[in-house]
Amino acid sequence: MDKDVDLSKYQIRTDLAIDYVEDEVELNGVKHKTEIIDGIKVTNVELEEVNALNKKKGKYITLEFDDVTDNSNRKKIIKTLTFVLKKLIHPKKNSFGLIVGLGNDKSTPDSLGPLVVNNIIVTNHLYLLNELSNNYKRVAAFSPGVMGETGIETSDIIKGVVNNINPSYLIVIDSLASKSIERLNKTIQITDTGIHPGSGIGNKRKEISIDTLGIPVIAIGVPTVVDATVIVSDTINFIYKNYAFNKEYMNDPKSKLTFNNVNYLNKKVKVDSLDKEKLLGLVGTLSEEELQTLIYEVLNPIGYNLMVTPKEIDFVIQKLSEIVSVSINNSIHNIDKSK
């Protein structure tokens, strides 16, 4: 990949810095490191002021995992997310945290923020009554709704509250968009750069960050939607990988009994450019970016570049909100509710 590539020209909607980062590719102004913590893949991306991702300078930490419905795995995610948040928040003895849940509670894939806020341990009222236990920090929380309901910019509502109660730091939670099916509901991004509500679905609102509010802002997001361009693009790539897998393994005696049940995406197979062209002709000669741009140009003018979420989103969003809320509570207060 060209180190000076300008990613702003691509139309694929994503809020995730990791969507643009590959292990073997160096990009200008981008540093990244991946490690495994308790079975959870954690990628640290640090962006300089000028960077190839055209994103704001700061830290972007991404947790990748498998099944949030598994209780044991969920505890590991909570433990890892708590560890990451403690490093970013640094809650001092007299610090005052404001937790804000962005999104629309009437739209399931966009309800992560409000659901998280519902389970935050709020203590500001106890602090004002001098009844706050030593194990708990001062915390307030609310959900501002969406502009379509209130008619007010979300950032303006938050700024009004911040100016009135003067918190030390802000944590915002929001649903995100990804340009990868594989990361849908299986990724959590934490960043110290703040957030642009609605940017992942092309409805960019005012920025919520230290620059606009004057206090540190930590943003936590989970990709709950992808657009149709992503689904079509990923499906084409899955066709390539499936074809390559069949070529390499179909005659292997060891694979005969389990061949139809093997997840070929987990197998290391080489996708040959000639095979791509053989399968899909001219389309098979396109690069990843050219393929995505072509699909976008086909679907977008006719209104079919739909935003899509999995059918089990109702159940999964509850589990994800539990993970985020418990992790925030554990990282701020001197408690552990994950056991």
Image (spheres, rainbow, N blue to C red):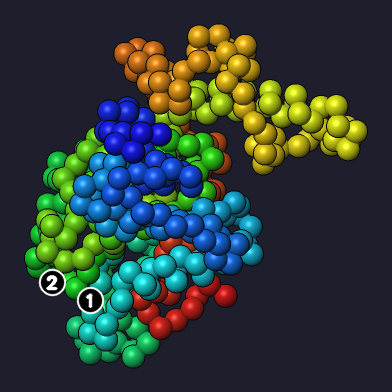
The one of 296 and 118 positioned closer to us in this rendering: 296
Horizontal and vertical percent position of residue 210: 16, 60
Q: Give the spatial CA distance, label 1 vs label 2.
A: 8 Å
**Res 321 label:** none
Q: Is residue 137 visible?
A: yes
Q: Is residue 205 above or below residue 39?
A: above
Mark 2, Cα crowd under 10 Å, few <14 / some 14-19 / many 20+, is some
Q: Which residue is mark 1?
A: 96
Asked if the residue at tag 2 contacts the one at tag 1, i.e. Cβ–Cβ closer than 8 Å, the answer is yes
- Residue in view at x 12 percent, y 52 percent: 156
The one of 162 and 179 positioned closer to us in this rendering: 179
Q: Amino acid at mark 2?
A: Asn
Q: Amino acid at mark 1?
A: Phe
- Residue in view at x 12 percent, y 64 percent: 214
- Residue in view at x 56 percent, y 26 percent: 237
Q: Is residue 102 visible?
A: no
Q: Quadrant of the C terminus?
A: bottom right
Q: Quadrant of the N terminus?
A: top left
Q: Which residue is mark 2?
A: 166
Element carrying mark 2:
loop
| Drawn side of residue 141 relative to residue 246, left or right | left
Number of dots carrying numbers: 2
Element carrying mark 1:
strand
| Drawn side of residue 171 relative to residue 63, left or right | left
Residue that extends furthest to the top in the rendered view of this protein: 281
Q: Is residue 159 above or below residue 303?
A: below
